[in-house]
Image: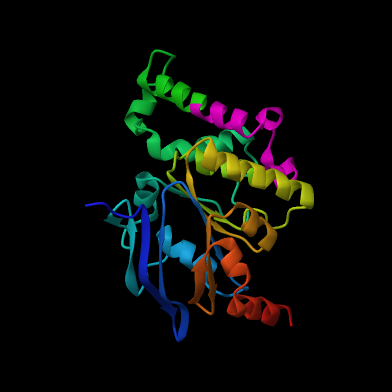
Amino acid sequence: MDFPFFLINNLSISFGGIKALQDISFTMNKGEIFSVIGPNGAGKTTLFNCISGLYKPNQGNIRFNGESIENKKPDAIARMGIARTFQNIELFSHMNTMENIMLGRHIHMKTGVFKGMLMWGRPSFAAQEEIQHRKKVEQIIDFLELQNVRDKFVGALPYGTQKLIELGRALALEPSLLLLDEPCAGMNSEEKQDMIFWIKDIQTDLGISILLIEHDMKMVMDISNRVLAINFGESITLGTPEEVQQNKEVLKAYIGEEE
């Protein structure tokens, strides 16, 4: 039996009397860029928190490669191949670029505390494992063209570069599904164009499927295969970027936000 690559069925979650999500359902195809849009407070980040295991939904099912994940812990979900970036940058400012991206390799490391204590030289298992992980990180640094900042503390780097480093750390998990929570938030026009370039390359060159939350409608329409619009935790419409952009309820939701 063939399962959808990613599926959400009748997902709902409430906080007290507030219904953050109500009966959200959609499927995602492998290899596509699928975007979720909606005004502030629509429930987009709550949806991501349910997918990544930070929140447990009250009802509904989340399936990844045919396996239910709605009751799994965040680390178990990451090990299955789902990585995430956050709207607010979550980097260690006192560490350099290489070290921050290396943190994304933790789920692939086999060296425990006792093996690590035996790391006395390059022939040791722990040392050899670290060399292999560093090679993976170097590949990501080359892919994202971060060579000139690889040894610099991230706290001193421009905002757009920090967002790119966070993206690199997510790629270090070697995901097959990448959740991007407003990757262009706070960026200037040039930085946004660069991020769009990287997202497209991640899809085409690395073959990673992307589930995206973004307020920049032009970006969403330019790069998405399909778009889900939600408001007040409920689905408005699902379709191609052109179909969603012309939907009256979507226009009403965004106009209402501006007023």
Could you tell me which residue is drawn at 65 percent across and 76 percent down? 251
The vertical placement of 256 against 122, above or below, is below
Lateral position of residue 122 relative to residue 231, left or right: left
**Magenta stretch: includes residue 4:** no
Badge count: 0
Colouring rule applied to residues: rainbow
Q: Is residue 62 visible?
A: yes
Magenta segment main secondary structure: helix
Could you tell me which residue is drawn at 44 percent across and 43 percent down? 175
Residue located farthest toward the right when viewing the structure as drawn:
189
Q: Position of residue 161 (x, y in %)?
A: 70, 42
- Considering the image in quadrants, where does the C terminus appear? bottom right
Could you tell me which residue is drawn at 35 percent across and 46 percent down? 80
Magenta residue span: 136-162
Lateral position of residue 184 relative to residue 173, left or right: right
Could you tell me which residue is drawn at 29 percent across and 54 percent down? 3
Residue located farthest toward the left when viewing the structure as drawn:
1
Q: Nearer the viewer, residue 29 or 49?
A: 29
Q: Nearer the viewer, residue 151 or 171?
A: 171
Q: Is residue 216 visible?
A: no
Q: Nearer the viewer, residue 158 or 80?
A: 80
Q: Position of residue 176 (x, y in %)?
A: 42, 44
The vertical placement of 173 against 8, above or below, is above
